[in-house]
Image (tube, grey):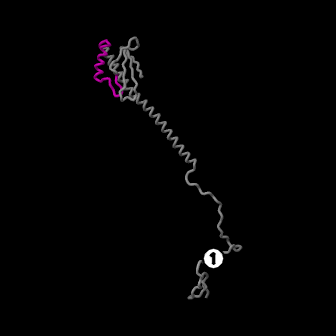
Amino acid sequence: MQPPPGYSQQPQGQPYPQQPQGPQYQQYPQQAAPGAPQYAMQQYPYYQPAKKGMPGWAWGLIIGGVLLMLVFMVVVAMVGMAASSANTRDAQRAEGEQLMGTARDYLRVSFARTGLSFQAFQAFSREHAGGSFSGKYYNVDPDPRELRGEVHDVEVTCSPTPAAADKGRGSLKFAWTTGSSDLQWR
């Protein structure tokens, strides 16, 4: 009886023939037989491996954008600080202007009662001693002065306190009867 294809042809129960011991190398033919399929390694074209990371232009764009953003933030901060200091100065000067306006009104009322400037100045000095013309950033100076030969009759000044951001001095000149005023900062 014939064994099916793929089975050995040796009879059953017989040992396999002895194989030589040691490394065994199978020898392949140097060339394939004509018409036989070629199993040699196929040659592919060489491509450089893809670079890892971002390209240089992308890094340049990112760094340029960051630097531009930093410059923008510095400019905005400088403008904000300048505007803030100007607003602070103006707000504090507004307190000085209000105090000088109050002193003007007090002097005009005192002058209207007596008709004499020195009595108005005396009443002002008493009121000033009580702290009526003092603020957080500016204080009205205690001695207003009478102006002669000018459009205005009296000048009231104010000086900054240590808390004031601006060390400018205010001056308010006014007329006794009309109350027309001229305000200046130095």
The residue that mark 1 highlights is 26
- Quadrant holding the N terminus: bottom right
Q: Which of 96 and 18 is in front in this view?
A: 18
Task: Report the amino acid beneath label 1.
Answer: Gln
Residue 139 drawn at (x, y percent): 34, 24
Q: In this view, does 54 lie to the left or right of 182?
A: right
Determine if the magenta segment contains residue 35: no
- Quadrant holding the C terminus: top left
Residue at point 48%, 38% (across, down): 74
Q: Is 151 situated above or below 46? A: above
Q: In this view, does 22 lie to the left or right of 162?
A: right
Determine if the magenta segment contains residue 126: yes
Q: In this view, does 185 lie to the left or right of 71?
A: left
Q: How crowded is mark 1: few (under 14 residues within 10 Å), some or many (20 or more)?
A: few
The span picked out in magenta is 113-140
Residue 157 drawn at (x, y percent): 37, 20
Residue at point 28%, 19% (across, down): 126
Residue at point 56%, 46% (across, down): 60
Asked which quadrant contains residue 180, the reply is top left
Q: Is 140 situated above or below 2? A: above
Q: Is residue 27 left or right of residue 179?
A: right
